[in-house]
Image (tube, helix red, strand yellow):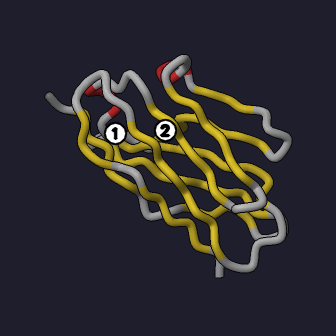
Amino acid sequence: QVQLVESGGGSVQPGGSLRLSCVVSGSVSSILAMGWYRQAPGKQRELVAKVAGDGSTHYEDFVKGRFTISSDSAKRVGYLQMTKLKSEDTAVYYCQAVIRDLGTYWGQGTQVTISS
């Protein structure tokens, strides 16, 4: 059974920073890619950033220059460093992992609130 557990969410003021973590556990042979998505109230879940097994990254325009995605395959951990946070970044953030031979898995989400 594969599980993804996010942590690091919280409440910060605009301009602040947070670092989200995603730990992958279970019978995992290889993590092909990891991604972070978010869902704000009343909106659809959207991609924030993703990182492939070869280290290549993709960022949506609204986080470019502010967020950094990374992963440690050996430790099975993914990170999302978020800086210069804005009120519109408020959402539940979800980790996604694509596991070789098993498919795509999601974490339970972690709340990020940006408010003064």
Q: Is mark 2 on a helix, strand or loop?
A: strand
The residue type indicated by label 1 comes to Lys
Measured along the vertical axis of the image, is residue 37 above or below residue 15?
below
| Corner quadrant of residue 26 | bottom right
- At label 1, counting other C-alpha atoms closer than 10 Å, the crowd grade (few under 14, some 14-19, many 20 or more) is few
* Disc 1 target residue: 43
Which residue does the numbered mark 2 point to in the structure image?
46
Labels in figure, total: 2
Compared with residue 84, is residue 41 higher up or lower down, i.e. above or below? below
**Residue 76 picture quarter:** bottom right
Residue 78 relative to residue 29: left or right: left
In the displayed structure, 79 sits above or below 102; it is: above
Residue 107: x and y in percent read 51, 62
- Residue at 43% of width from left, 43% of height from top? 38
Circles 1 and 2, Cβ within 8 Å, touching? The answer is yes
Q: Position of residue 91 (x, y in %)?
A: 33, 42
Q: Quarter of the image containing the C terminus?
A: top left
Query: Distance of mark 1 from mark 2, alpha carbons?
Result: 9 Å
Amino acid at the residue labelled 2: Glu
Residue 99 is left or right of residue 10, and the answer is right
Q: Identify the residue at image location x=38%, y=44%.
A: 39
Q: What element carries label 1?
A: loop
Image coords of residue 90 (percent x, y):
30, 36
Tell me which residue sits at (31%, 22%) in the image. 15
Q: How crowded is mark 2: few (under 14 residues within 10 Å), some or many (20 or more)?
A: some
